[in-house]
Image (cartoon, grey):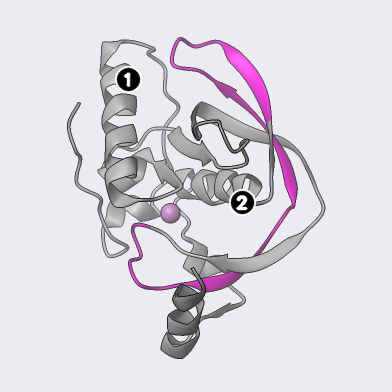
Amino acid sequence: MALRNIVTKEDKILHKVCREQMKFDDRLHQLLDDMAQTLENANGVGLAAPQVGILRRVVLVIETNVGEDEDEQILELINPVIVESSGEQVGAEGCLSVPGEYGIVRRPEVVTVRAQDRNGEWFEYEGHGLTARCICHELDHLEGHLFTEKAERMLSEDEIKSGSEED
Ligand code: NI
């Protein structure tokens, strides 16, 4: 495994539509493993392939809604599509490619995503709360969109400071 460089919003690659992932081979597995290490190293909750310079429909989402004794689970979503969504949540969102900036974004409370795993098998997964937010955010990356385009407003520096003190 190796750390990959996370590109920031100025990079053109983040504004392009990603292509379907066709091969479920060692190269994809290497990408997924590298992305997992990169995500962990950056302390994020999700990462899309274009953020490491790869224009493919591949994302990772960390499932944080787990029991106290359980480890967080990394969801590998290849060629993901949201097939159902319901409810609404309004909250602050950030992105590893937009460091230091946060905005208020409206997202569904629950989403069901259909995707392939690293071996090409299709499955469905239902995400709630932060996981639903993260799935939507990462899938937007595959269409070349950043949360800053969807934010109702961006947070001020004072708001960011007072928010981080609560953590
Ligand atoms: Ni992002």
Element at label 1: helix
Residue 95 % position (x, y):
41, 59
- Of residues 64 and 156, the one nearer the viewer is 64
Category of crowding for the residue at label 2, using alpha-carbon neighbours closer than 10 angstroms: few (below 14), some (14–19), many (at least 20):
many
Provide the residue designation for mark 2.
130
Judging by the rendered image, the residue that carries numbered circle 1 is 28
- The earlier-in-sequence mark between 2 and 1 is 1
- Rendered view: 34 above or below 166: above
Which residue is nearer to you in this view: 69 or 6?
A: 69
User: Horizontally, is 123 left or right of 163 in the view?
Assistant: right
Q: Please tell me which residue is depicted at 35% across the width and 65% down the height of the picture.
A: 98
Residue with the most extreme right position: 87
Q: Is residue 42 left or right of residue 104?
A: left
Indicate if the residue with disc 2 has its beta carbon within 8 Å of ligand 1. no
In this rendering, the count of numbered labels is: 2
- Asked if the beta carbon under badge 1 is closer than 8 A to the nearest atom of ligand 1, the reply is no
Which quarter of the picture shows residue 55?
A: top left
Residue 101, given in percent of the width and then of the height, sits at 40, 73
Q: Label 2 vs label 1: CA separation?
A: 26 Å
Instruction: Give the SS element for disc 2.
Output: helix
Of the residues shown, which amino acid type is indicated by label 1? Answer: Leu
Please tell me in which quadrant of the rendered image residue 119 appears: top left
Give the percent coordinates (x, y) of residue 7.
25, 54
Residue drawn where x is 46% and y is 43% of the image: 142
Residues drawn in magenta = 96-125
